[in-house]
Amino acid sequence: MARQAKHEELRVALLGEMGGAAPHTPLPTEREIATQHGVSRNTVRQALDALEAAGSVYRVQGAGTFVAPPVVSKSLTLTSFSEDMAERNLEPGSRLLAAGTVRAGRQLAERLGVAPDSKVVRVSRLRLADGSPMCLENVHFPADRVPGLVDEDLTGSLYALLNERYGLDIRSADQIIRAVDLDDTESALLGVPLGSSGLRVQRVGLDRRDTPVEATTTIYRADRYDIRFTVRRAQS
Amino acid sequence: MARQAKHEELRVALLGEMGGAAPHTPLPTEREIATQHGVSRNTVRQALDALEAAGSVYRVQGAGTFVAPPVVSKSLTLTSFSEDMAERNLEPGSRLLAAGTVRAGRQLAERLGVAPDSKVVRVSRLRLADGSPMCLENVHFPADRVPGLVDEDLTGSLYALLNERYGLDIRSADQIIRAVDLDDTESALLGVPLGSSGLRVQRVGLDRRDTPVEATTTIYRADRYDIRFTVRRAQS
DNA sequence: CGCGTTTATTGGATGGTACCAATTCAGTCT
DNA sequence: AGACTGAATTGGTACCATCCAATAAACGCG
């Protein structure tokens, strides 16, 4: 049955209805949508809130709700490499470079919120898009949370594996983005000239309780990768 | 008087109350907050929704609402350079490099949604932090929307000027982030060695109706600047 | 004592109502 | 024609009331 929340169903329905509509086309009024779909105006507002947050519509008090222009950028959400590549219409791939258990060390320990002496599992992979290198990925987990991980198949989606095998559900992540100069090893693996620049993304994945679960450092080829998103003014 | 919305006041109040509280400390239940502050539970939820979106609290159905750990990263919001530097405890500065009216050209025209032959106002500035170079900034406006801009004082906050003088209110922006190799001019102006990498942020500022108002390309020094933010899983 | 079950608690969803504030537009006056 | 005015429209805020779903604490059985 429709286990889905009504505002969620409505959101998808509205998204479909305004599919090919021209930008700035007005949607029906909130009250109209409510009666048409047989829901309360509260529910309509929830759906529209989500659509507005996603940048699909914009609202002007007194005027109406309108379909937003086809923005180049989507709102920034947490995605796995596989999902990220799918959005860009590229075929994701993976080459395992190394996997093992090591001592956390100071910096990693701080990011994961564990003791510096504790063990962490480290997985190094070269990620491919349409068969050629896209980025270098170093993932770290607290060892006690993922026993036996190194013996699994590590060429696919780690997120899926984590969820199924260990019940780890990463809901949000803190990220730090920086431009870096690639060193010899990195540029060789990525197949770019020495001295090229790269985009480094440091991420700490958090579960539902905002507890660190995973720390990843990814270095992307600057010539193949960019990050696109929409930002909004904070509420005054 | 308190012209402010109640849920907004409540949000600030709650933020204050949980000021020095330890992470994972539970907040009062939504129903308790409601009675304590003399508002409805709906209003409480609105306030908590905002706090959750900002990453200040997290909620677990059936358990409660808790203060979130002191994340390094804030949620990504649209900020001016001045605001950005203030957050980093740096003193913002500015050096005007050039200002004038030029033909839009294809790329810029597309970003601003105007004709390629139309005129745009261009303002080039070197932005400083604590007196030393932080980034190169190139701002473009459709010329007909900002008459007389080039004769204004362009060393301060452009956003403030736009708002006061032209009533332009930038509510959101589409951004594209990329790592780039700096050319001779850029590295000289920024005061970094030749061949250094930089972080390029291309931004299109949109008004309340999601209409392009401004297009900016900013190149940051990689050694002084990073971008920090939190991402969440999209609603399933 | 340990483990499964029940039950109370807590956030999530949904419906309803009322009034406020910004916008629009038709009508009016000049 | 143009500027002003005011009513109707539309989203924004706020309150109330119910029920559901996930959770965790209390309970009781073996």
Image: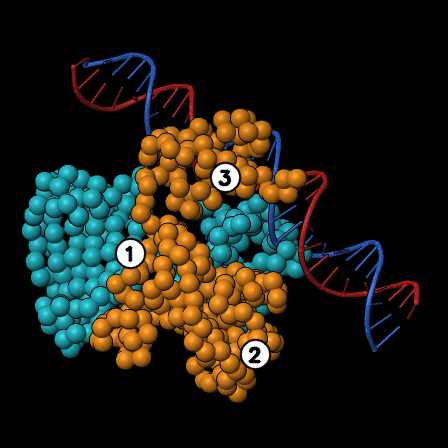
Chain colours: A cyan, B orange, C red, D blue
- Out of B16 and B57, give the one closest to the viewer: B16
Amino acid identity at mark 1? Ile
- Disc with the residue nearer the chain's start (2 vs 3): 3
x and y percentages locating residue A202 in the rendered image: 24, 56
Query: Is label 2 on the same chain as label 3?
Result: yes
- Out of A218 and B62, give the one closest to the viewer: A218
Furthest-bottom residue in this view: B117
The tag on residue B12 is 3
- Out of A140 and A22, give the one closest to the viewer: A140
Element type where label 2 sits in the image? helix
The tag on residue A176 is 1
Query: How would you rate the neighbour count of disc 3 (Cα within 10 Å): few for under 14, some for 14-19, many for 20 or more?
Result: few
Question: Label 1 to label 2, Cα distance in Å?
Answer: 36 Å
Element type where label 1 sits in the image? strand
The answer to whether B136 appears left or right of A99 in the picture is right
Q: Chain of mark 3?
A: B
Q: Residue at x 21, y 41 (%)?
A: A113
Query: Is label 1 on the same chain as label 3?
Result: no
The tag on residue B86 is none
